Image: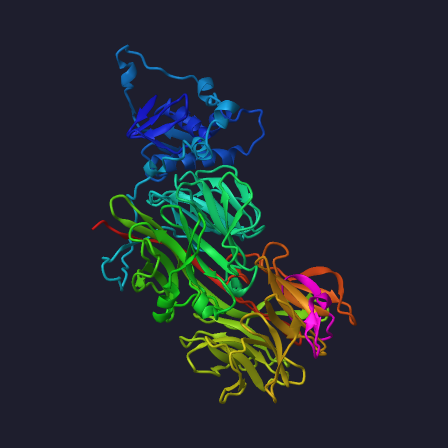
Amino acid sequence: MLRFGVFELDRKTGELSKSGHRVALRPQAARVLAILAERPDELVTREQLRECIWGSDISVDFEHGLNQCIRQIRLALEDDAETPRYVETLPRLGYRFIAPLRENKALATSGTHAVASLPDLLAPPAAHTGAELAALTPGSRRMFRWLAIAAMAAVAGVAGVVTSSHSVKRTPRGLPAPSLTRLTWDSGLTTDPALSPDGNLLAYVSDQNEEGHLDVYVRRVGGGDPLRLTFGSGDKRAPVFSPDGGIIAFNVDDDDGIYIVPALGGKARKLVSKGNSPQFSPDGNWVAFSVGDMSGVNLNTDRGDSMYVVAVGGGVPRQIRSDFIGATHPLWSPDGKYLLFLGNPNNDDAPEKSVDWWVTPLSGGAAVKTGVLDATRAAGLTSESQAYPWAIVPAAWDANGNWILFSARSGDSINLWRVQIAPTTFQLAGRPQQLTSGPAREEYPSLVSRPDGSMRIAFASLLQELSAWSLPIKPNEGKVTGAPQQWTRDEVGDFMPNVSRDGARLTFISTRPGDQEVWVKDLQTSTASALTTTHTLKYEPTFSPDGSWISFSEIPKWDIYIVPSTGGVQEMVCAGCGEATDWSADGKRLLGNTLDGRAWMLDLSSKHRTDLLSTRQWIATDSFAPDNRWFTFQSVGSGLFHAFIAPVSATPVPESKWIGILDGEVEAWSPDGNLVYGTSKQDGHECIWAQRLDPVTKRLVGSPFAVFHSHDARLSLANQTETTLAIAKNRLVFSMGERTGNIWMAEWKAP
């Protein structure tokens, strides 16, 4: 047994303890630590460590493996590379163990000191037989596997945290002002924090690897170097610790799967092939997750957003509340017997009445409507969903007092809030309380209530700029002829752009006045002005063919208006009709869909509305073909969007006459009508694709091909809730979101 400071390292088993409590340390890192500690104050070169650990005849990535081991050792020992107490780095040479070894009292009476030889240190830990493993229950088998990691409570303290001089301006009644600490200092995008159950470790995703995608990292809250846990393409999102702190679950946008990885490094294992936002049950045996778009638009769509539970060891997921037409973002109750989720049980009522936070027992029985979203709506709080702005997502369930955390917009700021529900009835038990009030977007809270009564919340503080962009193309060929150009640049958001057919003017939704209003910009003079000033949310402004009018929807009633593009009084043309997505070539009709997913065409003179499709599927329309004989639309199935073409007819068109295009959304036609453009995750990222069509039948010709790749995590088509495309002359117009930010922590001390 090697003893130093408050630590003990068992050379035979590789177990590290701090003050009698086991500390997570992987076997290979434990062997490196033992080699160093057996030679205190001596230089051990990197080549010597390679020979001892990997052997000279084995071809491995030795440099990466050793660096990972040293990071794990420092994380476990709460050591710092700049001011080390245990392991000192000698640049370009190796390492030296600098802490004094304490006497081994068990051997002191005989006057001996047992020193293992290097071959002894390389011996693997004793293996367990298959029979021994089979005797373990699923829960205990998991505990056995992660025994060395399960005691993360002793890994790290909070000493050395640099506390910000900023303070929260508004604090909910009953809570003192918290201390705010910035935990990461990256120049790019660092987000999705997750605190370990003891509040001492932080997992998060970041693009600091400079590879253009997000990966999962873990580090001590108190500082130190981060440990990278994931590699390979695709953005990793939503990491979460298991209750014992031993493993981390996360989802990958590249293949939509959920994975599990050891918290201190190791090989990731795929848990399910499709899912997002994983959440561990309190006993660590199960993972709840969602399947679907996650933007909230599928809450009113049968077979849209859905939620499941799967065993940590794998298996067939079990759907929860399959009777709901939309259910997403599940959170476990502290006792593990219930799930709270954002859901919609039916299409009979308006979404404003039926969409809410619900609590369902896992043992069977009716779900309980909490009434929380009525309270958040009354408080003027909204989400980022354009379709359902009141559909706020629950983020964390605090066992102390049954508080539910969430992030919401109030005015022009997005901050952290909480609301309380009754412990037995799950009904709303008070008004929402604001927790933070920073100027940036404060999102993705992770909460830990500690045994001493203190509370820690890690959250992402993000800056986001939504801007209109244009891409020079040959529209009838789908060929890009130049680099994308940014057409708007503001500190706020400009999105849902649409361009006049002569390419002279741009219309878009902007939040620059503090509200979402319709704006128009002259692309020759660069002058921009607001067309609306009604202080309500607007949706999808679209130029008429001659450019004289702009149509749009107004939320929350989803009335459809038209307004002169040069300014003037807006005119309602259809009350409660949903969204208008395009104009006919003669400017006499609008294409659109109701909020419950029925496609229609509106005659502007008679105000008569005609249903276009015969289906029970939820439909969102996109655009007319240039000859007005066809139109594109999307349906939602199993939480995914599927784009179609159908003929315009005097009678509703049955599904048998639909022409499937791609998985995604098709929003624009080439001028000759033989090519369509849309957004899709064909390659795992939200990108712009095109599909050639037969000039007469509109059947597909060949396969979809990429027009514009958007793989960067920081600047992306995916960094927004709604994407629109428009074509005018030789330009393809769309919006992208650029996100940067870091992780902060708010801490409330024990009363």
Colouring: rainbow
Tell me residue 191's x, y (percent): 43, 54
- Residue 565 lies, with reference to residue 478, above or below; the image says below
Q: Is residue 389 visible?
A: no
Q: Which residues are magenta?
A: 646-674
Q: Between 152 and 556, which is closer to the camera in this rendering?
A: 556
Which picture quadrant has residue 579?
Answer: bottom right
The furthest residue to the top: 110
Q: Position of residue 214 (x, y in %)?
A: 50, 51
At x 55% / y 34%, what residue is drawn?
A: 61
Taking the magenta stretch, the answer to whether it contains residue 617 is no
Q: Is residue 664 magenta?
A: yes
Looking at the image, residue 411 lies above or below residue 2? below
Which residue is outermost to the front? 365
Which quarter shows the N terminus?
A: top left
Residue 615 in the image: above or below residue 140: below
x then y, percent, for residue 429: 30, 61
